[in-house]
Amino acid sequence: MTAPTTIAAADLAALRWVQDHARGDAVVTGARLLSHAGEHAAAWIGTGLLGAALDRRRRPAWLVATGAVVAAHGASVVLKRVARRHRPLDHRVQVRVAVPSRWSMPSSHATSTTAAAVVFAPLLGVPTWPLVPAMAASRLVLGVHYPSDVTAGALLGAATAVVARRTATRLGVR
């Protein structure tokens, strides 16, 4: 077996394990709710715009943070078209939600959620990191991504958020 074949087999095995162990109406319903909230980064963009509207003193920081989420999401969409990895096609994987495209790498949901968790945490003053594993797991429960897709998305989202925060700091936006 070649290394890519071994990795692909492990990816599929991990996805199937999650689907075998994360069953039940409540789990699937929760995963679908997260999926809908994260579609096109809508919940995170809405959070940022609401923060900018309500927190006038820190409006520039909210707008920069929201821009970071938009940039992360956009980067994931572009990378999907470059990577051109198909979503799970194995007959043993249950797909439990509709998707806007057939491409899966990286997960845009994981990308935008991670970016939002990083950039909104200091503005909200509450831990936002639990959103990241919750969103990542939801994509596996729903059968629309492999574990490596959500891992790549989380890394891309974190990197985008860090670059945006550093850039904002250099420009004097706090």
Image (spheres, rainbow, N blue to C red):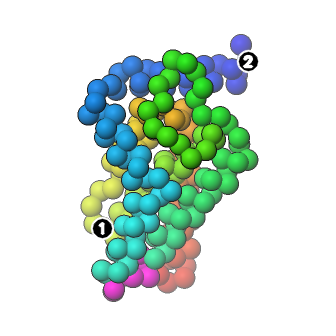
* Real-space Cα separation, disc 2 to disc 1, in angstroms: 46 Å
Residue 162 at least partly seen: no
Look at the image and give the residue range highlighted in magenta. 56-62
Asked whether residue 60 is drawn in magenta, I would say: yes
- In the picture, the quarter occupied by the N terminus is top right
* Marking on residue 2: 2
In the image, 23 versus 149, the foreground residue is 23
Task: Classify residue 106 by image quadrant.
Answer: top right
Residue at horizontal 56 percent and vertical 74 percent from the top:
167
Residue at horizontal 34 percent and vertical 26 percent from the top:
22
Q: What residue would you read off at disc 1?
A: 124
In the image, 163 versus 76, the foreground residue is 76
Task: Classify residue 60 by image quadrant.
Answer: bottom left
Question: Which residue is situated farthest in the front direction here?
Answer: 98
- How many marks are shown on the rendered structure? 2
Asked whether residue 9 is drawn in magenta, I would say: no
User: At which x and y percent is residue 56?
Assistant: 33, 86
User: At which x and y percent is residue 119?
Assistant: 43, 65
User: At which x and y percent is residue 168?
Assistant: 52, 76
Above or below for 107 versus 123 = above
Residue at horizontal 53 percent and vertical 65 percent from the top:
70
In the image, 122 versus 84, the foreground residue is 84
| Amino acid on which the number 1 mark rests in the picture | Leu
Question: Which residue is situated farthest in the top direction here?
Answer: 1
Tell me, yes or no, whether the two marked residues, 2 and 1, touch with CB atoms within 8 Å. Answer: no
Question: SS class of the residue under badge 2?
Answer: loop
- In the picture, the quarter occupied by the C terminus is bottom left
Residue at horizontal 43 percent and vertical 77 percent from the top:
61
| Amino acid on which the number 2 mark rests in the picture | Thr
Above or below for 94 versus 78 = above
